[in-house]
Amino acid sequence: MLGLLVHRPMSGYELLKDMDRNIRYFWAPARSQVYAILPRLVEQGLATARAVEQKERPDKTVYRLTRAGRDALDTWLAEPVEHDNRGHFLLKLFLSEHVRADVRPLIEERRTWARQRLGELRGLERQAERDGDTFHGVETLHHGIEQLRATVRWADAALRRLA
Amino acid sequence: MLGLLVHRPMSGYELLKDMDRNIRYFWAPARSQVYAILPRLVEQGLATARAVEQKERPDKTVYRLTRAGRDALDTWLAEPVEHDNRGHFLLKLFLSEHVRADVRPLIEERRTWARQRLGELRGLERQAERDGDTFHGVETLHHGIEQLRATVRWADAALRRLA
DNA sequence: TGAATCATGTAAACAGTTACATGATTGG
DNA sequence: CCAATCATGTAACTGTTTACATGATTCA
């Protein structure tokens, strides 16, 4: 949310529109969650709230990032990616647009992580085959392996597109 | 958790061991979450708790599925998969092992879902290219497309392995 | 002697969902 | 006239995490 408010001050409603346009496919919180977080940003000094009266529409509250909010965003982007955290990587990839930093290390790190993880899963796959595991158990491993191979393929292609 | 208790009555600790062995790669709740859910199963009549005294180890509580618990598992497995719900599909795939039902429709449905979704993302990809979106925005789309292609590939292969 | 394992929990927070609630305007 | 859009929220959950807390046994 800090990463979207960086563009321009917005109300919760506008923020949700922005999310729907940009990041819905990897992060889509409920409306009520966004409205719950916004006042918390103000409490934490990361944003300010300004009531805006409207004549033909209900009044709205517009949130604007503070300097501390901008700093918090930069700090978050500089922290290591939590690869197992759903959507965390894609969120950082998307938001690093606003912070002029090289994306290459981010993508390379994702690639390294995926390859390591791939090694683990292949180990379990061999073990499952030795142990004569059920179709169901083995297929969940095959599934994970295909997803990780796709991640490596994507990272390679993205790095080529960058070059 | 119902799907693991179906095998044999277990304490929270044993349940966590089982999870770590089998489903850790697509669902790994915290220890405290498992301990929080178990008494809730008893409240809902889905399991019974039995205190077991141990001499050389701390006492433990062993949970056993009731008939209602077994029915709840079957009902859950028969319900449509929530494809967007993290781990939901893999959990059902893994647990349908215990319920003698054909897995084929489950995998076919996953494949259909992934292909539809793939169509959506490809549409957004074309639009993003027309609109001249940033590298970051376009790459998140490429990433999603690769993941979905991997899902379709996996489903095709799994259906072949089944045949 | 110290780490790992066995075993169970509480507390506090944040994440995320669905359902409930209101009320005006715009456009087909 | 009906649906969608604009706009904001509350309530009640379930999901999920990290940190705190205890205490015995086994094995290197």
Image: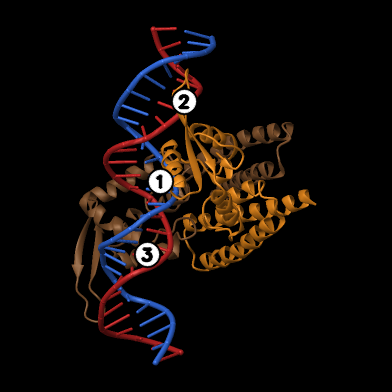
Chain colours: A brown, B orange, C red, D blue
Q: CA distance from mark 3 to mark 2?
A: 54 Å
Q: Which residue is mark 2?
A: B53
Q: CA distance from mark 3 to mark 1?
A: 26 Å
Residue at 66% across, 62% down = B112
**Are discs 2 and 1 less than 8 Å apart at CB?**
no
Q: State whether residue B95 is above or below residue C7.
A: below
Q: Which residue is mark 3?
A: A16
How far across and down, in percent of the image, does residue B2 sit?
A: 55, 45
Q: Is residue A108 visible?
A: no
Give the image quarter of residue A133. Answer: top right
Using the image, tell me which numbered label, if any, was put on residue A101.
1
Q: Secondary structure at mark 3?
A: helix
Q: State whether residue A142 is above or below residue B79.
A: above
How far across and down, in percent of the image, does residue B113 sit?
A: 62, 62
Q: State whether residue C4 is above or below residue B28.
A: above
Q: Chain of mark 1?
A: A
Disc 2 packing (10 Å; few <14; some 14–19; many ≥20) = few
The answer to whether residue A87 is left or right of residue B160 is left
Disc 1 packing (10 Å; few <14; some 14–19; many ≥20) = few
**Are discs 3 and 1 less than 8 Å apart at CB?**
no
Q: Is residue B46 visible?
A: yes
| Residue type, label 3 | Leu
The answer to whether residue B49 is left or right of residue B94 is left
